[in-house]
Amino acid sequence: MDDEERDPVGGSLPAGESVDERLLAVSETLIRYVEVVAALVLVVLFAIGVFDLGLQIFQSAARGDITDPLVVVGFIDTALLLFIIVEVYQTVVAYTQESETRRIVRLVIYTGVIAMVRKAIIFRTGEYANERLALLAAVSYTVIIFGLVALLLVERRTRVDDAAPTPESN
């Protein structure tokens, strides 16, 4: 691992004497507060989403259409959207806590994988003007999913390689 990977993202600026340095210090503090507010907004959105999902399930059970495949896909869509909110929240928190760049990148990849799987699950060919456009969208989704999975595998493999002892360390 090089120094860039060890250094946290967006470290603190040293307190300076010039007006520019003081303004930068104030702006950094404001950014931290905005990051915390963004995290809190995501928590509220997640809570609302969980309540909404529970309400959808309850209403579908009351109507008797809870076994309809399209209704179930709607539940899965909502649940995956909630997972995306959780991943974005974790990304904001990791960034706010100045975590390693590698952790933030991993969270972004997870978010992308969940988002693309969600798109694949709710994919409907009828939403496109013709079959050619639907096929193009399906191929695009597939390429993006495989690309994200490849990135995730590379990240995991390099993390394991970085953690393994080297012959020089013995």
Image (cartoon, helix red, strand yellow):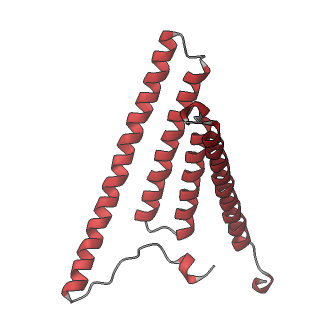
Which residue is rendered at x = 58% and y = 30% of the image? 126
Number of on-image labels:
0
Which residue is rendered at x = 65% and y = 51% of the image? 145
**Residue 130 screen position, x and y as percent:** 60, 36
Q: Is residue 82 above or below residue 149?
A: above
Judge by depth and name the residue closer to the eye, 150 or 50: 150
Q: Is residue 44 above or below residue 36?
A: above
Judge by depth and name the residue closer to the eye, 135 or 66: 135
Judge by depth and name the residue closer to the eye, 42 or 76: 76
Image quadrant holding the N terminus, namely bottom right
Image quadrant holding the C terminus, namely bottom right
Farthest residue, direction left: 19
Q: Is residue 60 above or below residue 146?
A: above
**Residue 23 screen position, x and y as percent:** 22, 78
Residue 18 shown left or right of residue 32 in the figure: left
Which residue is rendered at x = 69% and y = 53% of the image? 146
**Residue 59 screen position, x and y as percent:** 45, 16
Q: Is residue 27 above or below residue 44?
A: below
**Residue 31 screen position, x and y as percent:** 30, 66
Which residue is rendered at x = 54% and y = 52% of the image? 111
Judge by depth and name the residue closer to the eye, 118 or 160: 118
